[in-house]
Amino acid sequence: MNEYLVLVVEDDKPIRNLITTTLKMNNYRYITADKGNEAIMLSASHKPDIIVLDLGLPDIDGIEVIEHIRTWSDVPIIVVSARSEDSDKITALDKGADDYLTKPFSVDELLARLRVIQRRLMKTDNTSETEFVNGLLRIDYVYGCVYLDSEELHLTPIEYKLICLLAKNVGKVLTHKFIIQNVWGSAVDNSDASLRVFMATLRKKLNDSQQALIQTHIGIGYRMMKL
Amino acid sequence: MNEYLVLVVEDDKPIRNLITTTLKMNNYRYITADKGNEAIMLSASHKPDIIVLDLGLPDIDGIEVIEHIRTWSDVPIIVVSARSEDSDKITALDKGADDYLTKPFSVDELLARLRVIQRRLMKTDNTSETEFVNGLLRIDYVYGCVYLDSEELHLTPIEYKLICLLAKNVGKVLTHKFIIQNVWGSAVDNSDASLRVFMATLRKKLNDSQQALIQTHIGIGYRMMKL
DNA sequence: GTTTTTCTTAACACAATCTTAACATCCGAC
DNA sequence: GTCGGATGTTAAGATTGTGTTAAGAAAAAC
């Protein structure tokens, strides 16, 4: 028996039916979405074990869906896309996709790649919260909102990524290098200066001039304290 | 920079060179094999972090290599093959491959898929000890923190490196030269004096004026005692 | 195309860390 | 005991890392 829940995100109905029919025949449970925002909501509410994601969606780009989900979850994502350019594959994989299939694809190959992921899931089971709370700080990953003492904070995209990274690793000392790689991507320019500026603005917005929440470890990096 | 060791199994020399050159340029370490049996031996002896495997080998079939390695190891295997049939892909994936690229492949895509695997390894790969305990002293390597009697100590980068080195070699006498090489990197002129200063501050922070924890061996070096 | 927001860069002040040097102390050999 | 070499201690200066600000560039929104 197969208990895995798959979220299928695909706006093209024939292809979606092809996938869901295949899944059903192989004893997967599934839910479907035909829009990116719907996919984000469903992955938060239903916590699927695997996501099969088309990149060309009517509302937001599939890459954005990946980025958004990755702020709180490590759920395996298989991209199924008509875009066959190397650059598209590389972008998707670097943004957090686990695999990339080019349309037209063989359903048997999709099934095989699902089994690869299942094999891995059996070994490490991870649950992902959609909300993070620490003292007065609260992050709602699904809506992408941050609250301090119930007041909503306005954070820029980089500030948000930064606080999510710190929150995901609360208690851990994160090196500058690690932070820069995870927030800015593989491009390692001279973001060291930027990082300091962003920390300053984040602390200001969090009322953390005393560094009670975000500590500096000189010569190493930063750490969010568990309050 | 990049510490991952990749085993490249490929009998076609031009392709093998292409792969290894790419790996070298991206700061991977690598070893190569051009036969299946050699690959099996090497993966046992060198324990690579990732294997890139061609299926068409002169002695035994690549599938057999996968099966054999999977009897004892979960090391990620990326298959790179000229066989583009679905059935070949599915067989390889079901036998234990983690990914499958069809020749001719883009080296950039290979690199992206390697990064996907690395991302995964970073999360689960805690092969080494994550914590060190000795008497009242506790070092949490993952969190990068040192505790004495449950109180967190504030250590500078060099102090931290130093105590980690002593801890990893607890019970052993480490020579001055060894310590200096490992903490300061390659040959440094007059760090001998610095080392003494750092030992003093470390002992002060560890409340170890009696040298119960860190012993001096005159003319040789230092040793952390097992308590 | 213009306005607004966000990001990067540079400059500077300040704080933490590291090195160096001078001197004190310990240890073993004689 | 005392001598010499090695180690411990301390403090000052050099070096490096960090926080902060502001201005201009880049990107996004309109």
Image: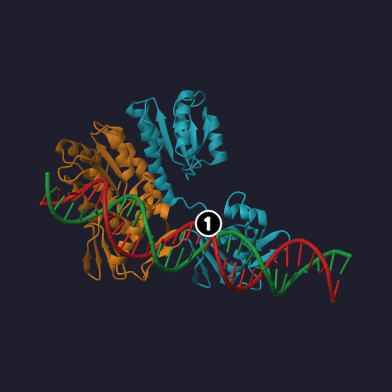
Chain colours: A orange, B cyan, C green, D red
Residue B95 position within the rendered picture, expressed as x and y whole percent measured from the top left: 41, 36
Q: Amino acid at mark 1?
A: Glu
Horizontal side of residue D1 vs B123, given as left or right: right
Q: Nearer the viewer, residue B55 or A163?
A: A163
Protein chain holding label 1? B
Residue B183 position within the rendered picture, expressed as x and y whole percent measured from the top left: 58, 55
Q: Residue drawn 53% across and 38% down?
A: B43
Residue B122 position within the rendered picture, expressed as x and y whole percent measured from the top left: 43, 49
Residue neighbourhood size for the residue with mark 1, other residues' Cα within 10 Å, grouped as few (<14), some (14–19), many (≥20): few
Q: Quadrant of residue A81?
A: top left
Q: Nearer the viewer, residue B149 or B161?
A: B161
Q: Nearer the viewer, residue A149 or A30?
A: A149
Q: Is residue A38 above or below residue B215?
A: above
Q: Is residue A222 above or below residue A115?
A: below
Q: Nearer the viewer, residue A161 or A49?
A: A161
Horizontal side of residue B9 vs A35, given as left or right: right
Q: Which residue is mark 1?
A: B129
Q: Residue drawn 30% across and 49% down?
A: A49
If the image is split into quadrants, where does the C terminus of chain B sit? bottom right
Q: Is residue A47 visible?
A: no
Q: Residue drawn 34% across and 57% down?
A: A165
Horizontal side of residue B64 vs C10, given as left or right: right
The secondary structure type at the circle numbered 1 is loop
Q: Quadrant of residue A147?
A: bottom left
Q: Is residue B203 above or below residue A181?
A: below
Q: Is residue B166 visible?
A: yes
